[in-house]
Image (cartoon, rainbow, N blue to C red):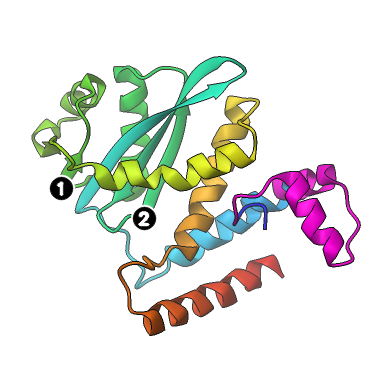
Amino acid sequence: MYVRFPLSLRNVEDLLHERGIDVSHETVRVWWNKFGPLFATEIKKRRAEPGKNWSNWKWHLDEVFVRINGETHYLWRAIDHEGVVLEVFVTKRRNRNAALKFLRKTMKRYGSPKVVVTDKLRSYRAAMKEIGNEASQEMGHRLNNRAENSHQPFRRRERAMLKFRSAKTLQKFASIHVSIHNHFNHDRHLNRRDHFKESRSQALAEWRQPVA
């Protein structure tokens, strides 16, 4: 429940108490630290199976400010043309080196995209110029709305968790959260109700296998 929904540790503790399970919120913290990465890894393996190809046609790149102990950090995010989050990456700076490291990490796993949509941050152009795919970059008003909207589930999580205490914790939770969010995200507003219900039931059945 903690990694799937925008709940605090104490919210989960209260929900479990209603179900007759008496545990501390600190126990829930230990559980997600131990099992969250295992769940995320298993989901990634299933999504990488034959027939579940990742698209490298168009990527949307964006970054958001995240405050950690009074210091500003940046959470970079890469999304494909269908809204699937490909990669998240935490840095202290938003310069060319940070953008270059983020791009190389994403391309190492998914290959080189044909089109990269970004905002007007100069770091993207400088990094892509060094990589050699500067010509594939696109910028424009509202072109990157898909990436900006993709930050909303994370922002809801951030508020529920009362922010983060370290960059390491942010990177770990963001990586786990996007894997599970991808698994349960079926574009409710785009699909017919019957198709959405079928996809949701299938996702829940697949989710119960690693959880069990």
Q: Amino acid at mark 2?
A: Val
The relative height of residue 1 versus residue 157 in the rendered view (above or below) is below
Residue, x 59% and y 69% (percent of image)? 207
Residue 168's x, y, as percent?
60, 29
Q: Amino acid at mark 1?
A: Lys
Find out whether residue 108 is within the magenta segment. no
Residue 15's x, y, as percent?
78, 59
- Marks 2 and 1, the one that precedes in the sequence: 2
Residue 118's x, y, as percent?
22, 35
Task: State the CA–CA distance, disc 2 to disc 1.
Answer: 16 Å
Q: How many marks?
A: 2
Q: How many residues crowd mark 2 within 10 Å: few (<14), some (14–19), many (20+)?
A: many
* 164 left or right, relative to 58: right
- Tell me the quadrant of the picture where the C terminus can be found: bottom right
Q: Quadrant of residue 94?
A: top left
Q: Secondary structure at mark 2?
A: loop
The relative height of residue 121 versus residue 83 in the rendered view (above or below) is above
Any mark on residue 201, and which?
A: none
Magenta-highlighted stretch: main secondary structure? helix
Q: Secondary structure at mark 1?
A: loop
Any mark on residue 84, and which?
A: 2
Find out whether residue 14 is within the magenta segment. yes
Q: Which residues are magenta?
A: 5-33
Q: Find disc 1 in the rendering and name its residue.
A: 114
Residue nearer the viewer, 161 or 51: 161
**Of tags 2 and 1, which is closer to the observer?**
2
Residue nearer the viewer, 114 or 169: 169
Residue, x 56% and y 37% (percent of image)? 158
